[in-house]
Image (cartoon, rainbow, N blue to C red):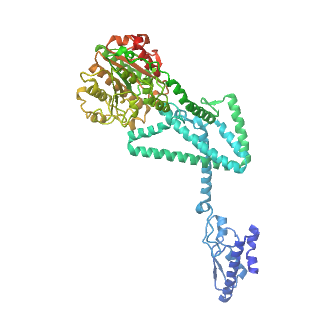
Amino acid sequence: MSLFTRSRQPLDTAEGGADSEDDTGGMEVAGEASGATEEADSASGAGAETGSGAGAETGPGAGAETTSGAGADSAEAVAAERDEGAEAAEKADGTEETAGPAERSDSPPPGWFGWRRRYPRTARGVTMGTTVLAGALVLFALLVPNRLERLGPEAFFRLPAEGILLAGLLLAVPPRSRRLMSVAAGALLGLLTVLKFVDMGFYSVLARPFDLVLDWILLDDAAEFVRESFGRTGQVLAVVGVIVLIVAVLVLMTLATVRVTNLMVGHRAVATRTTLILGTAWITCMTLGIQIAGVPLATKGNADFVNNRIEQVQAGLKDGRVFEKQAAVDAFAKTPPDQLLTGLRGKDVLFTFIESYGRVAIDDPAMAPQIDSVLKEGTNSLKAAGFQSRSAWLKSPVTGAGSWLAHSTFLSGLWIKNQQRYRSLTTSDRATLGSYFRKTGAWRTVGIVPGVRRAWPEGKFFALDHIYDSEHLGYNGPYFSWTPVPDQFSLEAFQRLEHGKKNRDPIMAEIILASSHNPWSPIARMTDWDELGDGSVFHQIKKEGTDPKEVWKDPERVRTEYRHAIEYSLHSLTEWVERYGTDDTVLVFLGDHQPVPTVTAGSTSKDVPVTIVARDPKVLDKIADWNWTDGLKPAENAPTWGMDRFRDRFMTAYGPRGD
């Protein structure tokens, strides 16, 4: 026992005693030391080799191997040396030695599978870096705006009221509540960040935020657009990428918030003082209205963001009841068929939508000269063919996308601003322009809808006797990005399939010209009408076109290609009228909505041009009191109506009261 007691003295001095496991190890070493003493005595000076044991701590440089001369060391010294070992060296130098017989082989390496022990400085650096990144991530979530154009450096040099308040609450609550609150706060910040990212996409395309009640169906449409533009593989990769990104944001934001909370609690005094200082600074900056680069230094953007979303949800839930009341009112519902559209009997009435043909094409200085030239040329060439035209503006319910909402607004006389209203409309008995034309029994109603590539059950609602989609126009040419059929071919197919037939009834047609649909690359170009054939001629034209992936790297190129697309659609339509129009042709053409914000360059206008073309002067005389502009180009101060007002005004002008 004397050997054990003496061999533990350095440990007791340095560490104040050892636990029971260390005592056991000491007894084993003592036993080995006794044996070593006997060996030393019998060897008469032969060197005895001892291993490093799990003994007391020694100073730096303690070796793993010690030689004892015969008769030079006592048994106590040998035992003490064997008791000292690699663990002491690890503590002193941070290096790991070969385990001696007294070290427990099952003791786990501390931290990151022993990596932190082997590389302590690097480990400290990683820890500090992770903490900094966590703080930056939380700050990013608190300050990031929900619109790309606001995503500048100035957006992140602000004081967020929500962050300061959250820090104060986390420091004040008890530990158990603090852990729950930090996890909940992190998850909420993650959700807000995801919603802001979604808003960025919606603002970039639709110039409005995502509607939490009404816009979920549009996500499916977005996925379908990706499939049509980049194929099935591109669609799958995009969807998987979005899901992974959402999960990553939620998880990382939660972990980051918990880590920052632990840091504050570990330095409570400093964190408390800092929170009080920032709170005082926020109140001061808000009171004085201090700004940096036009951006308020003190912000409560997240609170406003959440409040706006709550109001949006409430409005969305009420919108169904509001729309139901509006849809119940129809001024022509009880009008006898023989009194409907009497001023157009015997005429072919063609309602034609030009995709994304918005006011920006006419007003924007970068596009106006070229578009003005096309419209002026079209006006003069139509006049030479005996046609007159009048133009004005309509305000669309959408911008950037959502053509079907604009079409249904124009045809139904109701403001169809979201998918919920569209579904309610198309499952109701509300009469559209097509319904009233069909109700008279004087017209055959047809639809030329090249953008439709799958079942379209809503077509029955629009009262079309026959629908020609992309598969039934006789087109064997290539797609032009999203556009299945070029406009010139769609119009020629209408002539071949319906308008050009002899001994037919008058036609009311809904025609969709899709060549000016985003992404406007590549674009078809005009060719000889007699050479269109089955559309094979467009293969070479497509090869000569631009690559959308290259075009969309530069906003100015996007704007240029958009202008070219509008020029092509206008040329197609005006040349068709010159070529095939008759005394009985009445053409109403309009844009469905403004293009995406990349093209509108910050314009918030939802106006689109609308034009009526006819050879019979009586047709235009009936709308003389509308005060529309002569020609294909509406004047800047021409009348502007909501698109939902057109149906009733049109039917009034060409009904008995307009005669």
Position of 270 relative to 333 (above/below): below
Q: Nearer the viewer, residue 341 or 120?
A: 341
x and y percent of residue 512 in the render? 36, 28
Position of 67 relative to 628 (above/below): below
Q: Nearer the viewer, residue 381 or 103?
A: 381
Residue 12 occupies quadrant: bottom right
Residue 328 is left or right of residue 487, and the answer is: right
Residue 489 is left or right of residue 404, and the answer is: left
Could one spot residue 45 in this view of the protein?
yes
Residue 283 is left or right of residue 608, and the answer is: right
- Count of numbered circles in the view: 0
Could one spot residue 360 in this view of the protein?
no
x and y percent of residue 463 in the render? 38, 27
Identify the residue shown where x is 31% and y is 29%: 490
Identify the residue shown where x is 73% and y is 44%: 272
Residue 139 is left or right of residue 437, and the answer is: right
